[in-house]
Amino acid sequence: MSWGTIATWRMANEGVEKASTILKENGTAGDAVEKLINTVEAYPYYKSVGYGGLPNEEGVVQMDAAFMNGDTLAQGAVGAIENVMHAVSVARALSREHYNSFRVGEGATKFASLHGFEMTNMLTERAKKRWQKRCKEIEQQNLNPYDGHDTVGAITLDKNNSMAAATSTSGLFMKKDGRVGDSPLSGSGFYVDSKVGGAAATGLGEDIMKGCLSYEIVRRMQEGELPQDACNHAVYPFIKDLKKRYGKAGEFSLVAMNNKGEWGVATNVEFTFCVATDKQKSVILMANPIDNM
Ligand code: SD4
């Protein structure tokens, strides 16, 4: 009986270890992925996810998050939610609703509050200082305001062959009020089907959305490609094409796992990620863009 998990960035390491324990002990893919993401969300020194996440240009922390059940294909998501530490848990609660399962802004916070989620001021002193510094830098040095962002995205496979996917992020640093990225968007920031596998993304949401890259990877795996081939074929030609048609492509990376616990990644930037499976003890690995992009 295989189990496994793969997640974006080194920051997911502790969460991946906790998810592995759940999966080894016969827990569900859904519980494991939620625990993985919650662990990153609660840590105040990760500057792009959950508590301590970086604010928008008005100094307000707005989170995007999603949860998907690979058995039922049920999904829940929140966009630009404020004052909630565990946005992914709100997304999971929303995934149990047949209607109204993707909520944004005040409506998302209202749902969280009604469902007993604690209201938390998400702007830490540290994040506030970084924001103040960046405001000054932008004014004085004409810097690109949107540097500094990462998403934790993860796929889990449990011993019963069920899979789940989830994401959580504060999105682009200095984004506009109400801006929503790829992370809560089905098929772009995440997708999972227990009959096949799943994928999740991190990077410039505006460009990831242009290719629906998570769905494209799952679709390729469904056609029989291994996760690494699916990642290569979905991501690298897309980057080339985007550069040709749009003139540029932002930085982004994708991780994927199939329902046998085999995995793959593709990236156009130096990228760390975490993996653990029944055959592979939890590790942090590094991926680089392939040469002929
Ligand atoms: C977004 N994809 O909001 C997120 C941010 C991110 O690495 O992952 N950056 O566009």
Image (tube, rainbow, N blue to C red):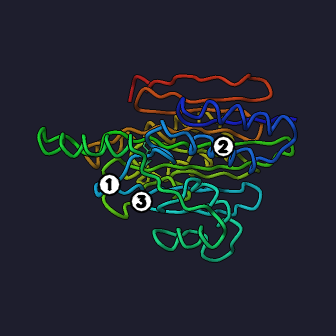
Q: Is residue 96 left or right of residue 206?
A: right
Instruction: Give the residue at the far front of this rendering.
Output: 125
Which residue is disc 3 drawn over?
180
As shown in the figure, which amino acid type bears the numbered disc 2?
Ile
What is the CA distance from the residue labelled 2 to the residue labelled 3?
Answer: 21 Å
Label 3 Cα neighbours within 10 Å, binned few <14 / some 14-19 / many ≥20: many
Between discs 2 and 3, the one toward the N terminus: 2
Q: Where is residue 276 in the image (x, y as percent from the top left)?
A: 71, 29
Element on which disc 2 rests: strand
**Which numbered dot is residue 155?**
2
Q: Which of 268 and 173 is in front in this view?
A: 173
Between discs 1 and 3, the one toward the N terminus: 1
Quadrant in which the N terminus appears? top right
Element on which disc 3 rests: loop
Q: Does the residue labelled 3 lie within 8 Å of ligand 1?
A: yes
Label 1 Cα neighbours within 10 Å, binned few <14 / some 14-19 / many ≥20: some
Q: Where is residue 130 in the image (x, y as percent from the top left)?
A: 31, 40
As shown in the figure, which amino acid type bears the numbered disc 1?
Gly
